[in-house]
Image: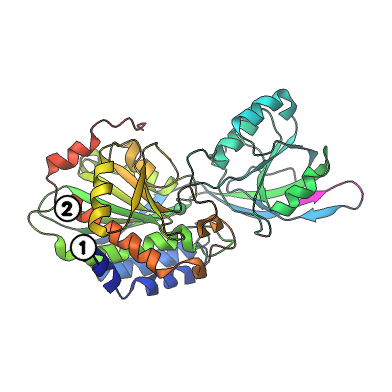
Amino acid sequence: MTSWQQAAAGDSALMNDFQTICGFGGRLSGTGQDEAAMEWALTRLREIGPDVRRVSVPYDGWRCLASSLTLLGGKPANLECVPLLRSASTAPEGLEGTVLDLGAGRPEDFERAGDAVRGKIVLVRHEYPFSQGHVHRRRKYDMAVAQGAVAFLIANPLPGAGPLSGSSGRPRDGAGIPAAYIDHEAALALAAQPGARVRLHIQGEELRDSMACAGILDLPGGRDSRIVISAHMDGHDLGCSALDNATGVAVALAAARILEPRLGPGTPGLRICFFTAEEWALAGSARYLADMPATERDTLKFNINLDTVAGDDTLCALISEYPALAGVVDGAAARAGVAVSHWLPFMPNSDHANFAKHGIPALRLVAGFEKPESRVRHILSRGDVAGIIHEDELRNALAVTCAMASLALDMSDDDLDALKAGSTCPRV
Ligand SMILES: [Zn+2]
């Protein structure tokens, strides 16, 4: 065993913390569960260091008041649906229309359908998000809007797994169309009847003055520069957001405990950031970083974002078009004794994307990259519960996180700044 594996194996609170976070429920921002979990996390952070604060950040809150989907023709049948966060509402009596099945709903599918999309209720399929070729829900939604669809249905491709939950990304008072997840069986029923007519009813409510929060622990070193370990606390309410992201928060807490004694006059500081409103198109971290004085932002040298770090026995670092981070990942994997692959293209699927866009070398550690059959497939579904997480996977993620952070803590500020070399990451 390497020293980092020993340290990870020796952290006795890791599994308890993980179970406690799951115990708060799905932690959807706006329900209060994310706030309660954050209060608990702040208490845990105070046991590691005194410089703990809670930063409030506004975001575009919204809640669903009512929703239904009815297959018309013959005997009307109710199909289960879950509106996307911030979906546009239908008229109070609902929206009746013809379903156009675009299969996966990839760019080529929309291109082929062309003008036939106009006025239709488009049906597409969700794709496993952690693979190089996948097309994100919000891109499919945007294509449907751009081509004149009147509503958007996106199906979970997994049989018996229910619908999913996710964000539409529609801004406050922004244009958009009613949009909802459905389950595999509902999609089969719709696909079996070309030209099927449905009535979709979604009533949502804009919540003005919604506030999300970030929980911050600063552990000082000997210099102003800082290494940041982040994880989002919020989730979705079908399951208990165990994969996404009780795993990341529990590992970040344990990493802070293990790394705290390593900080000293010769090292940068370590900052732990817990975000909420991540599931709302990354709104929490976007606002936290945008509101931060540029002088403070300049001290943040490297972001290790932990999101869905167990659920499979493989780990990948998404290094956000910062090619120099590949060396950090390889070095840390060797030190941790745990294999970690890396993927260079920018993937704006978690809070690391906001750090990266501010010019801060940033990566997301994720389990199950290119493993659609892994337990990570339960993400965003009612199957995202504590029981699917294996302790050894969580401990491997912890060993890798400690090894990456430790490697960065040993670097000079010049070496840390060199991690930006050759980056082609898009900027804010
Ligand atoms: Zn996540």
x, y percent for residue 94: 77, 45
Residue 71 in magenta?
yes
Q: Is residue 139 above or below residue 274?
A: above
- Would residue 9 be found to the left or right of residue 203 on screen? left
Residue 314 visible here: yes
**Which amino acid, by three-letter code, is at mark 2?**
Leu
Q: Residues within 10 Å of mark 1 (few under 14, many from 20)?
A: some
Q: Position of residue 427 (x, y in %)?
A: 35, 32
Tag 2 near tag 1, CB within 8 Å: yes
Q: Residue 409's mark? A: 2
Up/down of 398 relative to 303, above or below:
below
For the record, the magenta segment spans 69-74
Residue 338 within the magenta-colored segment of the rendering: no
Q: Where residue 19 appears, x then y in whole percent?
A: 44, 72
Quadrant in which residue 176 is drawn: top right
Q: Residues within 10 Å of mark 2 (few under 14, many from 20)?
A: many
For marks 2 and 1, the one nearer the N-term is: 1
Q: Along the horizontal axis of the image, is 57 left or right of 44?
A: right
Look at the image and tell me in which quarter the C terminus lies.
Answer: top left
Q: Nearer the viewer, residue 126 or 370?
A: 370
Q: Depth check: 146 or 91 in front?
A: 146
Q: Nearer the viewer, residue 90 or 102?
A: 102
Residue at the spot of label 1? 259
Locate the N terminus and report the quarter of the image it occupies: bottom left
For numbered disc 1, what is the local secondary structure? helix
